[in-house]
Structures are given as C-alpha cells and as structure tokens.
Image (spheres, rainbow, N blue to C red):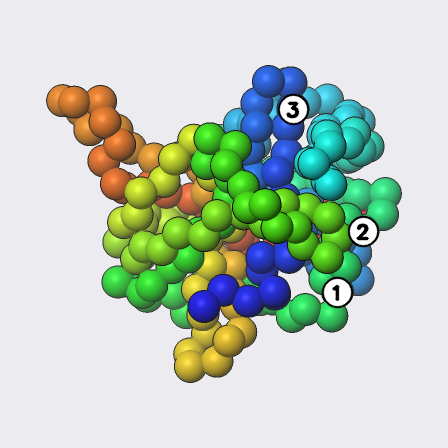
Amino acid sequence: MITANIIQRVLMVKYGEQIGTAFTVEIDEKQYLISAKHIFKDLSKESKIEILKGGVWQTINVKPIFCENHWIDIIAFELDKDLTTTRKLPITLTLDQTGLSQDIYFLGYPYGIKHDYHSSDGFALPLVKKGIVSAINGDVVWCDGHNNPGFSGGPIVIKKGNSNDIQIISVISGYRNDNKTGENSGIFYGYSIDLIVNAIKKSK
C-alpha cells in the first residue's frame, strides 16, 4: 500500500506542450522538485515551468540542476518556496539495498489521467502502478511493468522491509517498444535517484 509519504509529493508538470510527472524531496533542509530532463528540452538556467494545482496551471520560477553526465535523464529544480507540506513525512532517497525481482510501485499521470481527489496541498493525486525490478545495470534500473506516456519524471519506489517506510530508488525515463510491432513491450527504465541527489549536494 502506498502511503502519504510519497503520494503527497507527486504532481503534474508542463513545459511548453510537454506534460509529465514530478515529485518533491527534501535535502539538507531544502525542498527540490525532481523530474525527467527530456520533458524540459532547451530549458535555460533561470526559467519558468507550470504545475497543476487546484485544477489550474500555475507558473513557478525554477533554477535547474543537472547531473554531472548530461545524458542522464533526470533534472532537479531549486524552488523559491516549498510546494508540498511533506517535511514531516520521512522518505529515503537511494538505490541501495534494491534487489532483483523486488516489488516496485511507480506513480504518475499517464496521458494526463489523474484522480478527482487532491492532496492536502491541492495537487491532483497520481495513478499508482506496480511492477518488479528486472535488472540493475549501473545507474539504470530496468523494470517489468506497463509504463505509458505521462509517467516520465515520476518516482519508482520500494517498501523497506516489512515497514511502511518508502524508499525512492529511481526516476522514470521511458519504456521500450517491441521492435517488430512497435507496441509497448512492458519493459521500462529509470535512472538512479542517487545521481541527482549527488548533483544537488554538489550545487551548493
């Protein structure tokens, strides 16, 4: 079962015509927004993006933070102020202690679909889907699960042991299509959350 620790952090984002998913985290007492870099193509150093809040697109000022290797499809945004009131909701950010065939959950807004219900901060609740870890190749996590357009930038999470503690292990990047049919293969991938955590800490 997915708890408020993660579901209250997820929100829909837009840049130009691109719509995707993002989520908030707290690192060293400051809140950041994390998503997939490909949603924000040609983003400048100081820019504006849109977030869906209360059913209305709102523009916010952001300062992007990129991973050291620019081919990594993760981006973080330094915020002027907190977007979500989640500082008291503990979350772990690391790929460590993730195993093969481990159950994962991933959250987002496929095709812009969202719940009618909103978080306490006014953000439409995301869809939640389930899969397993199929492979971990360095910083890339391959998963068995049916991903769809709109999930990009969403968190891939696991539960820690028998507790309800949530661990974010990766950020959704994309999925593989079948080479013959062109249809969704049911295999998707994301990049380790550790990459952007390290980039945020180095940016200070």
Which residue is disc 3 drawn over?
A: 15
Q: Callout 3: 10 Å neighbours few (<14), some, many (20+)?
A: some
Residue at 85% x, 47% y is 81
Quarter of the picture holding the N terminus: bottom left
Q: Callout 1: 10 Å neighbours few (<14), some, many (20+)?
A: some
Of residues 150 and 135, the one drawn nearer to the viewer in this rendering: 150
Compared with residue 201, is residue 54 higher up or lower down, i.e. above or below? Answer: above
Return the x and y of residue 55 as percentages of the image width and height: 70, 36
Q: Callout 2: 10 Å neighbours few (<14), some, many (20+)?
A: some
Which of the marked residues, 1 or 3, is nearer the chain's N terminus? 3
Residue kind at label 2, given as amino acid type: Asp
Return the x and y of residue 186 as percentages of the image width and height: 26, 41
Which residue is disc 2 drawn over?
A: 82
What is the tally of numbered marks visible in this picture? 3
Instruction: Left or right? Give the position of 136 relative to 171.
Output: left
Which residue is disc 1 drawn over?
A: 87
Of residues 136 and 163, the one drawn nearer to the viewer in this rendering: 163
Dot 3: what SS? strand
Dot 2: what SS? loop
Residue kind at label 3, given as amino acid type: Tyr
Residue 168 in sight here: yes
Residue at 48% x, 48% y is 127
Give the CA distance from mark 1 to mark 3: 26 Å
Give the CA distance from mark 2 to mark 1: 9 Å
Residue at 46% x, 43% y is 172
Residue 198 in sight here: no
Residue kind at label 1, given as amino acid type: Arg
